[in-house]
Every structure is written in C-alpha cells, then in structure tokens.
Image (spheres, helix red, strand yellow):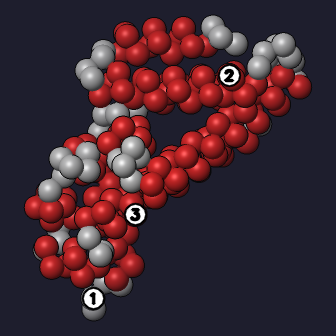
Amino acid sequence: MARPRTFEEDRAVEAAMRAFWDAGYEGTSTQDLCEATGLGRSSIYNTFANKRDLYERALRRYQEERTSALIELMASDRPAMEKIRTVLWQAVDPEAGDPAGCLVVNALVELAPHDPEIAVLLRRDGERRVEAMRGAIERGQALGEIGAEKDAPALAHFVVATVSGLRVAARGGAGRAVLESIATTALTAF
C-alpha cells in the first residue's frame, strides 16, 4: 500500500528545510533537494510548484516549529529569567544534528530584501517572537523577577536580536566559549 501523499510531502518539506537551512536558497540546487528528500526531480516538481514554493513551505515549517516552541516556553510557569536563559542557551547549544545558524536569519539576509512575500512571513514571525518574549518579561516584572524600570519591549527585541546574533556567530565558526560569553553578557541587561 502506498504511503499517503501528505506523509511524503511532510517528509520532503522537513528534508528540504534542513537542506535550505544548511546551504541557503541559492546554494541548494534541485539535485541537492532530490538527494535530501529522496525524491526524483519530477516528483519534486509534481508535488511542489517550484523550488521557491518548496522553500516557502520549508521556511513556514521552520517558523512554526521554532516559534511555537518559543511561545510555549514563554507562556510556561517557569521564572522569567529561567525562560530567557533557556532561549539564549538553546542558541549556544543547538540540538544535535541541526545545521549551524538559523533558517530565519538566513532568509532575512538572502531573500527578504528582494522577495516581498518572504519578507512579510519573516516580519510576522518576528513580531510573534518579540510579543511572546515581551509578555514573559512583563509577567516577570509583575512578579518582581525583573526590575519594573526596565523597558520590556526593548528587552524583548534585544533578546531576539541576541539569539539571531548567536546563531550567526555559530554559523561563522565561533566556539562555545565565545557563544557562552555573549549569552552571559546578554543576561546582565536584566
């Protein structure tokens, strides 16, 4: 019995996501996508309109997985500083097997400047991340965990930008000691 098409699509999108994350949009050829997904060229183009369509679906998947996890963490009952520390250390110690860097950061640099649809996706995702972080910081302020005089929206943007910077530094080859020092320094803003 053949596997359902949605299974094949989900598996292909996941594999393509990792290929694009590792090599970028331009750096990932159709042959690379065939090798990553295990699908032939015709199967890829029968399932997805084109490389750009597959990239957008992969980016959406990445955003949904990563942003949903962030929102869940920020909404948890854990202390605010523990949440922030966790987010920073996830950038210092990414999951085993994940490519270095961040697909969102890569897309911001590579595609957003000339692809308005991708730019909108990235802007909306960034707003969701900052809003989740801001909410956690404000709850931490209300509970006295973070000083009430601190600017919660500015701190939220700062943490999100720091995580992006950590991912770029890791992609550029920064060692663990450097990444830890960046994360530790970021915590002093609180």
The image shows residue 169, relative to residue 107, as above or below, that is above
In the image, residue 8 lies at what x, y percent?
31, 75
Query: Residue drawn 13% across and 73% down?
Result: 41
Q: Do the residues labelled 2 and 1 touch (CB within 8 Å)?
A: no
82 or 68, nearer to the observer: 68
Q: Residues within 10 Å of mark 3 (few under 14, many from 20)?
A: some
Q: In this view, does 147 lie above or below 90?
A: above
- Disc 2 marks a residue whose amino acid type is Leu
Q: Where is residue 172 in the image (x, y as percent from the top left)?
A: 27, 23
Q: Could you tell me which residue is drawn at 29 percent across and 75 percent down?
A: 49
Left or right: where 79 falls relative to 129: right
Q: Mark 1 points at which residue?
A: 2
Q: Distance between the residues labelled 1 and 3?
A: 23 Å
**Number of numbered tags placed on the structure image:** 3
Question: Which structural element holds mark 3?
Answer: helix
Residue matched to label 2 = 155
Kind of residue at badge 3 = Arg
Left or right of 183 in this view: 109 = left
Which image quarter holds the N terminus?
bottom left
Residue 103 visible from this viewpoint: no
Label 3 to label 2, Cα distance in Å?
31 Å
Question: Which residue is situated farthest in the bottom direction here?
Answer: 1
What amino acid is labelled 1 in the image? Ala
- Badge 3 is on which residue? 57
The vertical placement of 30 against 182, above or below, is below
The residue sitting at 35% across, 21% down in the picture is: 169
